[in-house]
Image (cartoon, rainbow, N blue to C red):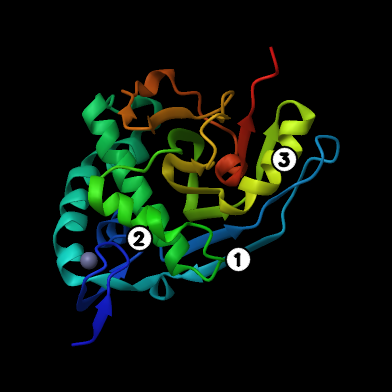
Amino acid sequence: MARVKCIFCFETGDRAKEHIWPKWIHEFDDTSDSKVIVGRHFGSPMTGLKLLDERTQSDNSFVFGQVCQSCNNGWMSRLESRAMPLLKNAADEGVNAAPWSNEQSRIVAGWAFKTILMINAGTNYRKIVTKVHYRNLYNSSNPPRGVLVEVGLSKSIVAGRELAQSQNLMVLGPEETVVQKNDRHQKRSYVIGLALKHLLLRATYWPDHTASINPDSEMTQLFINGVSSAVDFKKVIPSESTAHLSIGMIVYPMAA
Ligand SMILES: [Zn+2]
């Protein structure tokens, strides 16, 4: 049995072959295609969005080998079975899905963040997520401070599974602040989203806590800084596209 130093618990243990998309999803959406979208670039507001790179990868290549068996069979497996019924219902039913309580939102946010970490670790995109965030999730079962997890709905069923990752955060605020903060924080920030049938999930990280993350978001807040929010899917407005899955907006307050 191959041994590995686990990216979550830092222990050296027997290696698990952790699929980025958990096994139940393969049966659930009956597709073997996953679409990976990377590096969506912001143009100016005048020119609109420019897509830099889009590709598909087969599911078999979505295996990540740096997880130990005790994590894989322990907390990750428990998280999977708690989140699965909630995810399936929302992915199938969209606006008619059963609402999520605060606690259910917290479970889904943990699952979304776990899956998003696996997406970045297991695809051949730049490793934009700091290693510390893997450890944070293992220690607290929740996304770390500064990470906003949001939920949304797609009007039509998304064909295949979609993963989108980028560091495309538009920073707004007083000019001096923007220039200075942009340089310092952009390289550590990330936006990673996924789509499963009607369900959209996105995690946005900005290291500076004095800014607001996605204040005018088209998505609904699920979890930030230790606090989860209940979700009423009847109030979620379904979006026409999934283009926003890898785009974030950071807003600094104007000087008083
Ligand atoms: Zn482990």
Residue 44: percent from left, percent from top: 82, 40
Residue type beneath disc 3? Gln
Which secondary structure, mark 2?
loop
For marks 2 and 3, the one nearer the N-term is 2
Q: How far from the left and from the top, in percent, is residue 201?
A: 44, 41
Q: Amino acid at mark 2?
A: Trp
Horizontal side of 171 relative to 123 (left or right) equals right
| For marks 3 and 1 on the same chain, the one whose residue lies earlier in the sequence | 1
Dividing the picture into quadrants, the one containing residue 60 is bottom left
Numbered label attached to residue 21: 2
Q: Secondary structure at mark 3?
A: helix
Q: CA distance from mark 1 to mark 2?
A: 17 Å
Position of the N terminus by quadrant? bottom left
Q: Nearer the viewer, mark 3 or mark 1?
A: 3
Callout 2 touching callout 3 (CB < 8 Å) = no
Residue at the location (34% across, 33% down)? 93
Quarter the C terminus occupies: top right
Q: Residues within 10 Å of mark 3 (few under 14, many from 20)?
A: few
Q: Which residue is mark 1?
A: 55
Between 253 and 224, the one lying in front of the other is 253
Q: State how many labels appear.
A: 3
| Residue at the spot of label 3 | 180
Judge the density around disc 1: few (<14), some (14-19), many (≥20) Cα neighbours within 10 Å: few
Estimate the x, y position of residue 194 in percent, counting from the top left: 46, 49
Q: Residue lying farthest bottom?
A: 1
